[in-house]
């Protein structure tokens, strides 16, 4: 159980410190919008975790051994360079 507890603590750290940034506060003014912002952060976290699991499966490794911070940096760099252009419909 001790190790399971630290896994959730690690996720809290990823969300609060690395993904959101240390001094960023919730910008929303109403409770409903705060909930929406939290859901947005959770969806973003999940979107970062998907390539981590894919990379771990490809390398036949445990997904816990893939760095969240490195994956987050790669995703931010990819978005900043336009690696994910908007789709044209």
Image: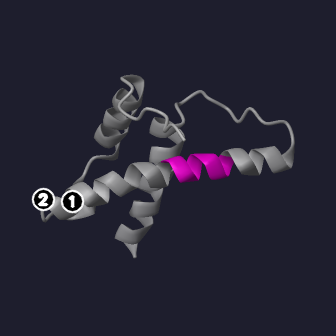
Please tell me which residue lies in front, 44 or 24: 44
The quarter holding residue 6 reads bottom left
Q: x, y percentage for residue 41?
A: 58, 46
The quarter holding residue 27 reads top right
Q: Distance between the residues labelled 1 and 2?
A: 5 Å
Crowding at mark 2 (Cα within 10 Å: few <14, some 14-19, many 20+): few
Please tell me which residue lies in front, 38 or 87: 87
Please tell me which residue lies in front, 69 or 3: 69
Determine contact: label 1, label 2, CB under 8 Å.
yes
- Residue at image position (35%, 27%) is 77
The quarter holding residue 25 reads top right
Q: Quadrant of the N terminus?
A: bottom left
Q: Does the magenta stretch include residue 42?
A: yes
- Residue at image position (51%, 37%) is 88
Q: x, y percentage for residue 68?
A: 34, 46
Q: In what element is the residue under mark 2?
A: loop
Q: x, y percentage for residue 24?
A: 62, 29
Left or right relative to 68: residue 9: right
Q: Name the residue under label 1.
A: 56
Q: Mark 2 points at which residue?
A: 59
Q: What stretch is highlighted in magenta?
A: 38-44
- Residue at image position (16%, 60%) is 58
């Amino acid at each position: 159980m001790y190790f399971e507890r630290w896994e959730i603590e690690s996720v809290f750290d990823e969300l609060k410190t690395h993904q959101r940034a240390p001094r960023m506060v919730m910008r929303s003014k109403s409770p409903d919008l705060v909930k929406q912002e939290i859901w947005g952060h959770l969806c973003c976290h999940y979107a970062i975790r998907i390539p981590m699991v894919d990379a771990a499966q490809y390398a036949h490794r445990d997904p816990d051994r893939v760095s969240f911070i490195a994956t987050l940096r790669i995703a931010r760099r990819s978005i900043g360079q336009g690696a994910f252009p908007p789709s044209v419909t």
